[in-house]
Amino acid sequence: VQLVESGGGLVQPGGSLRLSCAASRFTFSSFEMNWVRQAPGKGLEWVAYISSRGDTIYYADSVKGRFTISRDNAKNSLFLQMNSLRAEDTAVYYCAREGGDSWGQGTLVIVSS
Amino acid sequence: DIQMTQSPSVMSASVGDRVTITCRASRGINNYLVWFQQKPGKVPKRLIYESSNLQSGVPSRFSGSRSGTEFTLTISSLQPEDFATYYCLQHNSYPFTFGGGTKVEIK
């Protein structure tokens, strides 16, 4: 199993970023996926879930209405569109397969002016 | 939302010690409880799934158990490589929630 995130970086408050997670070495379309984040020096926080077909989605209250999770099973890719970013969204963002058995290496998002 | 109360938040232990970490769920989560280990700068690693199933490749000194809404991770004999932070995660209902973490330090 391989998961590789990309798209992180420095963004100003109120800005947007789109994270990607490229999946390989497993049948991506058969698995539910999640985004999890970790602020610097803090614990883990679950962010969003998407079912294998993309027809069921859930969000943490802290990101609801601002973040959108999606997937493209034909391209073995998971996405997180992040809008209206706040300083408190600064974190390493991980994509994780259902049950947490596999994680990407993470991508750092810094929201700062 | 289901709250996961993890304790202790920090503990000091010696090599060879038996270590117990607890997560209490604010309501029933069946066996949908996962334990992770995370070392500084590293990705979380799944140790236990469905409350008591050992992840393939994880040493047998790690075990998980459940009593009602209380879940326990036990390390039977702490090894030098086990000094890390441990998290529980409930995935019974959304939003999924992690415990606050337990940092196991060297005494």
Image (cartoon, coloured by chain):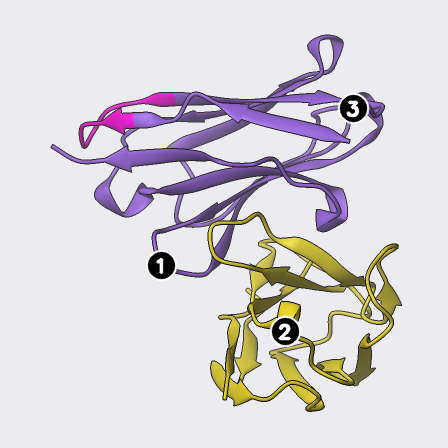
Q: Chain of mark 3?
A: A
Q: Amino acid at mark 1?
A: Gly
Callout 3: few (<14), some (14-19), or many (20+) C-alpha neighbours within 10 Å? many
Callout 2: few (<14), some (14-19), or many (20+) C-alpha neighbours within 10 Å? few
Q: Amino acid at mark 2?
A: Pro
Q: Is residue A22 magenta?
A: no
Q: Which residue is mark 2?
A: B80
Instruction: Please report contact status of discs 1 and 2: CB closer than 8 Å, yes or no.
Output: no
Q: Colour of chain B?
A: yellow
Q: At numbered mark 2, what does the secondary structure look like: helix, strand or loop?
A: helix
Residue range in magenta is: A10-17
The residue at the far left in this view is A113
Mark 1–mark 3 Cα distance, whole angstroms, equals 31 Å
Q: Which residue is mark 1?
A: A41
Q: Residue at x 59, y 89 (%)?
A: B14
- Which numbered disc flags the more N-terminal residue, 1 or 3? 3
Q: Amino acid at mark 3?
A: Phe
Q: At numbered mark 3, what does the secondary structure look like: helix, strand or loop?
A: helix
Q: Residue at x 22, y 43 (%)?
A: A87
Q: At numbered mark 1, what does the secondary structure look like: helix, strand or loop?
A: loop
Q: Chain of mark 1?
A: A
In this view, the mark in front (3 or 2): 2
x, y percent for residue B35 = 70, 65
Image quarter where the N terminus of chain A lies is top right
**Picture disc at residue A28:** 3
**Picture disc at residue A95:** none
Mark 1–mark 2 Cα distance, whole angstroms, equals 22 Å
Predominant SS of the magenta segment: loop
Q: Residue at x 34, y 52 (%)?
A: A40
In this view, the mark in front (1 or 2): 2
